[in-house]
Amino acid sequence: MNPDAILLCYCSCPDTASAERIAETLVGERLAACISRLPGIRSTYRWQGAVTTDSEELLLIKTVAGRYEALRTRLLQLHPYELPELLAVPVERGHDAYLEWVRANATG
Protein backbone atom coordinates (compact mmCIF):
# COMPACT_ATOMS: atom_id res chain seq x y z
CA MET A 1 0.00 0.00 0.00
CA ASN A 2 1.15 3.50 -0.79
CA PRO A 3 2.48 5.05 2.46
CA ASP A 4 0.53 8.25 1.69
CA ALA A 5 -2.78 6.35 1.42
CA ILE A 6 -5.34 7.53 3.95
CA LEU A 7 -6.64 5.03 6.52
CA LEU A 8 -9.66 5.28 8.77
CA CYS A 9 -9.02 3.16 11.86
CA TYR A 10 -11.63 2.05 14.37
CA CYS A 11 -10.85 1.40 18.02
CA SER A 12 -13.28 0.93 20.90
CA CYS A 13 -12.36 2.01 24.43
CA PRO A 14 -13.99 1.13 27.77
CA ASP A 15 -14.38 4.71 28.98
CA THR A 16 -13.90 8.41 28.27
CA ALA A 17 -10.61 8.64 30.17
CA SER A 18 -8.84 5.92 28.15
CA ALA A 19 -10.31 7.20 24.86
CA GLU A 20 -9.12 10.72 25.62
CA ARG A 21 -5.64 9.57 26.66
CA ILE A 22 -5.21 7.47 23.51
CA ALA A 23 -6.56 10.21 21.22
CA GLU A 24 -4.39 12.95 22.69
CA THR A 25 -1.27 10.78 22.61
CA LEU A 26 -1.70 9.55 19.03
CA VAL A 27 -2.43 13.04 17.69
CA GLY A 28 0.27 14.61 19.87
CA GLU A 29 2.85 12.15 18.53
CA ARG A 30 1.67 12.79 14.92
CA LEU A 31 0.61 9.17 14.47
CA ALA A 32 -2.85 10.45 13.54
CA ALA A 33 -4.06 13.75 12.15
CA CYS A 34 -7.44 13.65 13.85
CA ILE A 35 -9.39 11.32 16.12
CA SER A 36 -13.14 11.66 16.52
CA ARG A 37 -14.63 10.18 19.68
CA LEU A 38 -18.13 8.74 19.66
CA PRO A 39 -19.40 8.20 23.22
CA GLY A 40 -22.31 6.05 24.26
CA ILE A 41 -21.95 3.11 21.90
CA ARG A 42 -23.03 -0.35 23.04
CA SER A 43 -20.95 -3.31 21.93
CA THR A 44 -22.11 -6.92 22.09
CA TYR A 45 -19.39 -9.52 21.64
CA ARG A 46 -18.26 -12.97 22.63
CA TRP A 47 -15.43 -12.99 25.17
CA GLN A 48 -14.06 -16.01 27.00
CA GLY A 49 -17.04 -18.11 26.01
CA ALA A 50 -19.76 -15.69 27.08
CA VAL A 51 -21.82 -13.09 25.23
CA THR A 52 -21.24 -9.70 26.81
CA THR A 53 -22.63 -6.21 26.25
CA ASP A 54 -20.75 -3.12 27.41
CA SER A 55 -20.82 0.65 26.99
CA GLU A 56 -17.79 1.91 25.08
CA GLU A 57 -16.43 4.95 23.32
CA LEU A 58 -15.45 4.53 19.66
CA LEU A 59 -12.40 6.24 18.20
CA LEU A 60 -12.36 7.11 14.49
CA ILE A 61 -8.67 7.58 13.77
CA LYS A 62 -7.52 9.33 10.57
CA THR A 63 -3.95 8.53 9.54
CA VAL A 64 -1.77 7.44 6.63
CA ALA A 65 -0.64 3.92 5.79
CA GLY A 66 3.00 4.80 6.40
CA ARG A 67 2.25 5.57 10.05
CA TYR A 68 0.00 2.55 10.70
CA GLU A 69 2.60 0.23 12.27
CA ALA A 70 3.84 2.92 14.67
CA LEU A 71 0.22 3.83 15.49
CA ARG A 72 -0.63 0.18 16.13
CA THR A 73 2.36 -0.31 18.41
CA ARG A 74 1.61 2.83 20.42
CA LEU A 75 -2.13 2.11 20.67
CA LEU A 76 -1.42 -1.38 22.02
CA GLN A 77 0.89 0.15 24.65
CA LEU A 78 -1.77 2.63 25.77
CA HIS A 79 -4.95 0.56 25.57
CA PRO A 80 -6.34 -1.04 28.75
CA TYR A 81 -7.97 -4.03 26.98
CA GLU A 82 -6.21 -7.38 26.76
CA LEU A 83 -7.33 -7.58 23.10
CA PRO A 84 -8.00 -4.06 21.73
CA GLU A 85 -10.06 -3.58 18.60
CA LEU A 86 -8.06 -1.98 15.81
CA LEU A 87 -9.41 -2.08 12.27
CA ALA A 88 -7.88 -0.06 9.42
CA VAL A 89 -9.97 0.68 6.35
CA PRO A 90 -8.49 2.36 3.26
CA VAL A 91 -10.21 5.60 2.28
CA GLU A 92 -11.10 5.42 -1.40
CA ARG A 93 -12.43 8.95 -1.81
CA GLY A 94 -12.80 12.16 0.13
CA HIS A 95 -12.50 15.91 0.03
CA ASP A 96 -9.06 16.41 -1.55
CA ALA A 97 -8.08 19.32 0.68
CA TYR A 98 -9.02 17.34 3.80
CA LEU A 99 -7.08 14.28 2.64
CA GLU A 100 -4.00 16.47 2.07
CA TRP A 101 -4.46 17.91 5.56
CA VAL A 102 -4.49 14.37 7.01
CA ARG A 103 -1.28 13.56 5.13
CA ALA A 104 0.40 16.75 6.35
CA ASN A 105 -0.59 16.17 9.98
CA ALA A 106 0.00 12.42 10.32
CA THR A 107 3.64 12.40 9.39
CA GLY A 108 6.56 12.55 11.75
Image (cartoon, grey):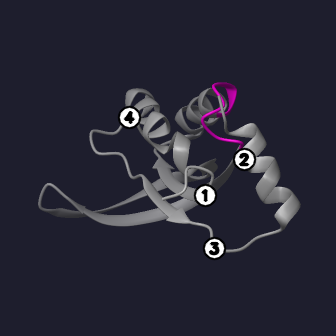
Looking at marks 2 and 4 on the same chain, the residue that comes earlier in the sequence is marked by: 4
Q: Quadrant of the C terminus?
A: top right
Residue 47 placed where, x, y %?
21, 57
Assess whether mark 4 and mark 2 are in contact (beta carbons under 8 angstroms).
Answer: no
Whether residue 32 sits left or right of residue 69 in the image: it is right
Assess whether mark 2 and mark 3 are in contact (beta carbons under 8 angstroms).
Answer: no
Whether residue 38 sits left or right of residue 73 in the image: it is right
Looking at marks 3 and 4 on the same chain, the residue that comes earlier in the sequence is marked by: 4
**Residue at (38, 34) in percent of width and height:** 76
Q: Secondary structure at mark 3?
A: loop
In the picture, the disc for residue 76 is 4
Looking at marks 2 and 1 on the same chain, the residue that comes earlier in the sequence is marked by: 1
**Residue at (54, 40) in percent of width and height:** 67
Give the CA separation, mark 1 to mark 3.
9 Å
Of circles 4 and 1, the one toward us is 1
In the picture, the disc for residue 5 is 1
Identity, as a three-letter code, of the amino acid under mark 1? Ala
Q: Secondary structure at mark 2?
A: helix
Give the CA separation, mark 2 to mark 1.
8 Å
Q: Secondary structure at mark 4?
A: helix
Give the CA separation, mark 2 to mark 4.
23 Å
Q: Which residues are magenta?
A: 27-33
Nearer-the-camera pick, 2 or 25: 2
Residue 95 placed where, x, y %?
83, 68
> Which secondary structure dominates the residues rendered in magenta?
loop
Q: Residues within 10 Å of mark 4 (few under 14, many from 20)?
A: some
Residue position for label 2: 103
**Residue at (48, 55) in percent of width and height:** 55
Q: Secondary structure at mark 1?
A: loop
Residue position for label 3: 92
Number of marks in picture: 4
